[in-house]
Image (cartoon, helix red, strand yellow):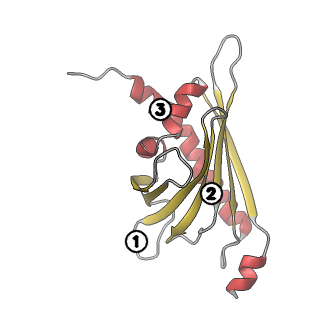
Amino acid sequence: MNDMVNSKRKWHGSVGGIVDAPIAQVWSVVSQSSRLTEWMPMIEKCTNLAGEEGAPGYIRLVSGFMFPQKDGDRSWIKERLVLMDASSHSYIYKMEASNVGLDGSLNSLKLVDYSDDDHESTLVDWTFEIDPVEGVSEEYIIDYLGFLYKSCINRIEGAICTSLEPTSI
C-alpha cells in the first residue's frame, strides 16, 4: 500500500503575507535557526545536528507541537537545508525524518521587497510540496499546513520588534 501512496503525485500548497518591515530585517529573523522559536509558535526547540548553518547539507532538529500526536508527545522533524540564497532572500529545507508523516516534504521560503516610496514592507511567500499522506485528505493537510505557516508569517513582525527593543541593564 505504501508504494501506491508514494507513486502518486505530490501535494502542493502555498501561503503568503506582508510583513511591515524592510526585507533585510525579515531575512535576519527567518534565515537563522536560532530564531525559529521567535516566529514559529509551535516550535519549542531547534537543535543544530550537522553542518554549517546557511550551507547546503546543514541539518537541524525542530521539536514542539507542530502536529498533534496521539500519545500527547511532541512532534519532531529532522530537516536538511537544500538551498539558501541570501541574495534572493530564499531557502529550501527538506524534511528528512519525523514522527509526523511528512518525510521527504520540501518547504521553500522566499522574501520579496514590497516597499514603495512611503513604506518598507516585505512579502513572505512560503510554498510546500509533500507526498500524499495515507489516511488524510489532501484538502485537510494543505489547509492545516497553510494555517500553520500563516500563523508563523504573522509573528515575524513581532520578532523583529522584540529584537529591536533596547535591552535594560
Report which residue position mark 1 lands on.
72
Give the answer, above or below, for where 62 lies relative to 158.
below
User: What residue is shown at x 58% (from left), y 41% (from top)?
Assistant: 153
Question: Marks 3/2: CA distance?
Answer: 21 Å
- Secondary structure of residue under mark 2: helix
Give the answer, above or below, for where 25 lies relative to 78.
above
Closer to the N terminus: mark 1 or mark 2? 1
Q: Which residue lies furthest to the top in this view?
A: 117
User: What residue is shown at x 56% (from left), y 39% (from top)?
Assistant: 154
Give the answer, above or below, for where 118 lies relative to 123.
above
- Secondary structure of residue under mark 1: loop
Q: In terms of depth relative to the viewer, which is nearer, 46 or 169?
A: 46
Amino acid type of the residue that numbered disc 2 sits on in the rendered structure = Leu
Q: Which residue lies furthest to the left in this view?
A: 169
Amino acid type of the residue that numbered disc 3 sits on in the rendered structure = Gly
Find residue 158 and name its label: 3
- Secondary structure of residue under mark 3: helix
Report which residue position mark 2 lands on.
145
Question: Marks 3/1: CA distance?
Answer: 29 Å
Give the answer, above or below, for where 98 lies relative to 41.
below
User: What residue is shown at x 60% (from left), y 59% (from top)?
Assistant: 94
